[in-house]
């Protein structure tokens, strides 16, 4: 199953080469992002600078990072897999996150400065009553403004 996450590029490493135990050579390049969050009431974006996942692109996928620069808003598509192995008589588990595509997001909503502070607005009667509803019936007050945003609606945390 494929997943995707939206964030601001925090760091990009240079391409580096290595060799596996079996003697095969490969290249890799790291992409570190800060997670992009949205206020559920105002829709204002903000960066969670304490949440910085690293994605390691391998071989020909390293080229995707050539047009990406620090500060860009991107969508990283990835797979998650896990496996178990035995070490010193104990069962251990490894989780692999394998990115396979990165997209540069150019929508104006995402281009707002990451230093901008969201403006607090008084809650309306509709918002107040919505906050008092049980969890399964919560609703979002933020509506994506373009077809491109609708395509990534599943990435939004609300």
Image (cartoon, rainbow, N blue to C red):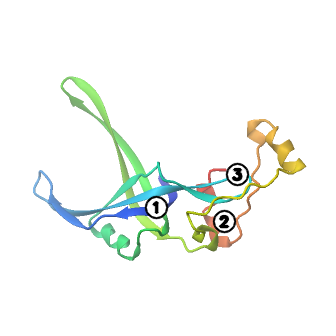
The part of the image, by quadrant, that contains residue 59 is: bottom left
Find numbered disc 2 in the image and state the secondary structure of the residue it sits on.
helix
Residue under label 2:
150
Does residue 57 sit above or below 125 in this rendering? below
Q: Nearer the viewer, residue 131 or 18?
A: 131
Point 74% across, 37% down: residue: 135
Q: Nearer the viewer, mark 3 or mark 2?
A: 3
Camera sees residue 60: yes
Per the model, the C-alpha gap separating discs 3 and 2 is 16 Å
Per the model, the C-alpha gap separating discs 3 and 1 is 22 Å
The outermost residue toward the bottom is: 67
Residue under label 3:
40
How many other residues sit within 10 Å of disc 1, few (<14), some (14-19) or many (≥20)? Answer: some
Residue under label 1:
76
> Left or right of 146: which side holds 89?
left
Q: Nearer the viewer, mark 3 or mark 1?
A: 3
Per the model, the C-alpha gap separating discs 2 and 1 is 17 Å
Residue 17 placement (x, y as % from top left): 18, 64
Find numbered disc 3 in the image and state the secondary structure of the residue it sits on.
loop
How many other residues sit within 10 Å of disc 2, few (<14), some (14-19) or many (≥20)? Answer: few
The outermost residue toward the top is: 89
The mark that comes first in sequence, 3 or 1, is 3
> Left or right of 82: which side holds 108?
right
Q: Which mark is residue 5?
A: none
> Left or right of 144: which side holds 51?
left
Q: Label 2 near label 3: C-beta < 8 Å?
A: no
């Amino acid at each position: 199953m494929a997943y995707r996450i939206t964030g601001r590029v925090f760091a990009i490493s240079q391409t580096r080469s290595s060799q596996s135990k079996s003697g095969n050579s490969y290249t890799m390049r790291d992409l570190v992002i800060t997670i992009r969050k949205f206020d559920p009431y105002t829709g204002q974006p903000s960066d969670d600078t304490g949440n910085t996942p690293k994605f390691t692109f391998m071989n020909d996928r390293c080229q995707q990072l050539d047009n990406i620069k620090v500060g860009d808003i991107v969508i990283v598509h990835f797979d998650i897999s896990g496996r178990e192995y035995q070490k010193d008589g104990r069962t251990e588990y490894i989780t692999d996150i394998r990115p396979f595509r990165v997209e540069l997001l150019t929508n104006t909503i995402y281009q707002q400065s990451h230093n901008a502070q969201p403006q607090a607005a008084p809650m309306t009667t509709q918002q107040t009553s919505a906050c008092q509803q049980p969890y399964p019936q919560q609703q979002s007050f933020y509506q994506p403004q373009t077809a491109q945003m609708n395509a990534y609606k599943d990435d939004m945390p609300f």
